[in-house]
Image: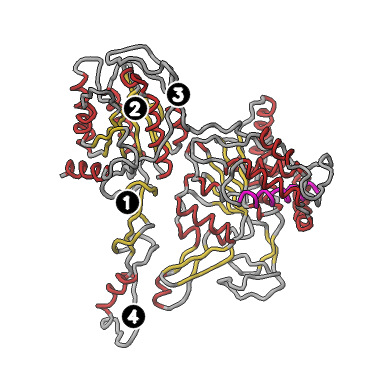
């Protein structure tokens, strides 16, 4: 067995270590989500924690790790008699990003269930992680339905598996730890809220600390066992402290004063629901137990807020995480002393680490902002000075744009797709392991062969060839590639603020529908890939916010650059379908025959059947209708900025699909 890197040898990362230890003391805290850039010891610290957890007693032979002191009466391997048991180390189970639902929750042997009428259940990773740690690296890249199953099991402490009337339930209580790199996309706010605590980690900028990280890592790689032995005493001390804190936790007193501070803090930061209050209360109690105290102090409440609230304050993906610590201190001071008398707040501390990093005061997340005077200017169809970036107008709810036809790409919410989850549309022979049985089709396939199989009475003889897999249709996420005109003509009449607001609205829609996004801009003499295709829509929003304008309109260059981006992306991810959103007034200037070149570039998309929408940004009393002509060349449809709003034109999606269908025909 590989020797893990010692937990106490991790350099820095005080907030990460504290959050993990608090969950080890009180699993009811609800786990921890670790957010940070790659190479910041996220995985190392989580794996090291498992070696610190106390051994667990289990019923011999039980695949579900039942506690012999109080075995689960509904255990599929039960019933078990209380008493006895053997000890083993607490497990750390890793959930791979590409895991299937059956691998996570377990699978039933459908053949035996039909033929023999027995519940032949093979436990999954949730059963393996019971009474241990379930570690999900890159949790933001998991399919949504797997995250839902995972967090439901963590909240209920049990996993339920149902297949065609056969039901199995088993206990699944574990310390849930997820890690993610925000650059690769965010979790939905509803899922963020299900993690008890969150910490932001980053590599140290102090040279001495970075030197120590490298020194310890090299020493560990040279001799893992010897390196671990040098830290054995510190590891034993932390392990003993965890055991002592667990024993002390039931005696920790959470007074009315601390409860009022918790409630006031959650209200002051406008946190939705009551989960934050409960998590803060449990975290504050665990902090007190970790410090060896039986009373919760104001400092425990403050530290709990820094760990439990930052990820619950995000209203949309463009909001900055973190807490305003000045506001937090003012709230705690205002409600200090309310209720019963707390112990001396200047008494012995013991939070176990430094306050969690805050993201600074929360930004406005791209909310309403008016362009400053002088940002517009006169139209500049053939050149002009570069202008500073303008703020985006307030985002709005957009019309649903979708890719026609049925795809087979990554799970999402935009377009129709053949998936493992969704409504049943038919049946087919299974390819590989049977996961979703279509019972009626299976019976229909087996019925004509019963006499040949010697069956004359009631019942049915089912063979492997009779089994039918349910064909299901759900939704997929697409690649939404924005091609934004940033030329001088777009800056005229202060239009860029409205244009950015429209693109920001589409980005928010893409986030909600689990799309990948990319951003191509064109101005002056060429086009640039401002953001390669990514799942991080907040990165796209940041690039959009700082986008300058000015110069000529190389429309053909922008379309050709977008075509190249899609070509490369198809090689990387052939199943993900693209939706190209061109944001322009349709003017093309610069070079020889700019209009003809733009038309030829647009027809490349039409020839390949790429779904496209042109957002017409032309304004003023006299309009040339060039964006509509561009949409015709693309084989897509054109909508104005006003029509893009969800409450404007009914049937926009029908227009998009109808145009594409006619093109395909």
Q: Nearer the viewer, mark 4 or mark 3?
A: 3
17 left or right of 348?
left
Residue 663, image x, y percentages: 17, 41
Note whether residue 226 is visible.
no
Which residue is the site of mark 1? 417
Residue at the extreme bottom of the image, as rendered? 457
Residue at 46%, 64% (x, y): give it: 107
- In this rendering, the answer to whether 36 lies above or below 441 is above
Residue closest to the eye, 234 or 295: 295
Tell me the CA gap for discs 2 and 1.
28 Å
**Of callouts 4 and 3, which one flags the residue occurring earlier in the amino acid sequence?**
4
**Of callouts 4 and 2, which one flags the residue occurring earlier in the amino acid sequence?**
4
621 left or right of 316?
left
Which residue is the site of mark 4? 460
Element marked by disc 3:
loop
Residue closest to the eye, 220 or 573: 573
Are the residues at dot 4 and dot 2 in contact (C-beta closer than 8 Å)? no
Tell me the CA gap for discs 2 and 3.
13 Å
**Of callouts 3 and 1, which one flags the residue occurring earlier in the amino acid sequence?**
1
**Of callouts 2 and 3, which one flags the residue occurring earlier in the amino acid sequence?**
2
Which residue is the site of mark 3? 546
Which residue is the site of mark 2? 484
Residue at 66%, 40% (x, y): give it: 306
Element marked by disc 1:
strand
């Amino acid at each position: 067995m590989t020797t893990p890197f010692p937990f106490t040898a991790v350099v820095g990362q005080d907030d990460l270590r504290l959050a993990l230890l608090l969950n080890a003391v009180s699993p009811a805290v609800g786990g921890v989500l670790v957010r940070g850039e790659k190479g910041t010891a996220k995985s190392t610290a989580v794996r090291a924690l498992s070696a610190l957890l106390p051994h667990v007693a289990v019923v011999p032979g039980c695949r579900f790790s039942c506690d012999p002191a109080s075995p689960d009466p509904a255990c599929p391997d039960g019933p078990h008699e209380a008493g006895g048991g053997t000890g083993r180390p607490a497990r750390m189970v890793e959930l791979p990003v590409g895991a299937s639902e059956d691998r996570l929750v377990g699978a039933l042997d459908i053949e035996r269930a039909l033929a023999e009428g027995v519940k032949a259940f093979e436990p999954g990773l949730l059963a393996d992680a019971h009474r241990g740690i379930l570690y999900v690296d890159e949790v933001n890249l998991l399919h949504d339905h797997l995250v839902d199953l995972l967090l439901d099991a963590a909240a209920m402490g049990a996993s339920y598996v149902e297949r065609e009337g056969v039901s199995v339930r088993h206990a699944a209580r574990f310390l849930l730890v997820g890690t993610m790199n925000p650059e690769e996309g965010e979790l939905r706010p509803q899922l963020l809220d299900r993690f008890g605590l969150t910490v932001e980690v980053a590599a140290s900028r102090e040279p001495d600390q970075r030197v120590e990280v490298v020194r310890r890592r090299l020493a560990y790689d040279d001799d893992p066992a010897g390196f671990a032995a040098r830290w054995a005493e510190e590891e034993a001390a932390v392990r003993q402290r965890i055991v002592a804190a667990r024993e002390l936790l039931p005696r920790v007193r959470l007074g009315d004063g601390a409860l009022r501070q918790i409630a006031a803090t959650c209200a002051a930061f406008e946190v939705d629901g009551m989960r934050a209050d409960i998590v803060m209360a449990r975290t504050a109690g665990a902090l007190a137990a970790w410090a060896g105290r039986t009373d919760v102090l104001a400092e425990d409440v403050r530290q709990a807020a820094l760990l439990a609230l930052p990820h619950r304050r995000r209203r949309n993906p463009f909001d900055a995480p973190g807490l305003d610590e000045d506001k937090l201190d003012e709230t705690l001071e205002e409600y200090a002393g309310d209720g019963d008398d707390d112990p001396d707040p200047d008494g012995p501390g013991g939070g176990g680490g430094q306050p969690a990093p805050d993201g600074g005061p929360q930004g406005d997340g791209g909310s309403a902002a008016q362009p400053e005077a002088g940002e517009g200017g006169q139209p500049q169809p053939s050149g002009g000075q570069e202008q500073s970036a303008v703020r985006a107008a307030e985002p709005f709810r957009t019309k649903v744009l979708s890719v026609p036809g049925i795809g087979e790409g990554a799970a999402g919410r935009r377009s129709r797709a053949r998936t493992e989850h969704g409504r049943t549309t038919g049946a087919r022979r299974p390819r590989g392991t049977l996961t979703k049985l279509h019972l009626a089709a299976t019976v229909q396939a087996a019925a004509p062969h019963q006499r040949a199989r010697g069956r004359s009475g009631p019942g049915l003889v089912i063979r492997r060839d009779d089994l039918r897999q349910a064909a299901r249709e759900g939704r997929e996420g697409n690649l939404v590639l924005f091609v934004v005109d940033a030329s001088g003509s777009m800056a005229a009449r202060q239009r860029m603020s409205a244009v950015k607001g429209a693109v920001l609205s589409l980005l928010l829609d893409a986030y909600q529908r689990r799309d990948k996004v990319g951003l191509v801009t064109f101005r002056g003499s060429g086009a640039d890939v401002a953001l390669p295709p990514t799942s991080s829509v907040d990165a796209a929003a940041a690039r959009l916010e700082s986008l300058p304008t000015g110069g000529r309109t190389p429309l053909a260059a922008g379309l050709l650059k977008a075509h190249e981006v899609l070509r490369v992306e198809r090689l990387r991810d052939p199943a993900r379908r693209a939706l190209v959103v061109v944001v322009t007034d349709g003017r093309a200037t610069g070079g020889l025959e700019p209009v003809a070149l733009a038309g030829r570039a647009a027809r490349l998309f039409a020839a390949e059947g790429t779904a496209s929408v042109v957002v017409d940004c032309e304004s003023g009393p006299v309009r040339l209708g060039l964006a509509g002509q561009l949409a015709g060349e693309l084989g897509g449809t054109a909508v104005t900025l006003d029509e893009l709003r969800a409450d404007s034109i009914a049937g926009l999606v029908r227009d998009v699909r109808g145009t594409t269908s006619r093109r395909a025909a």
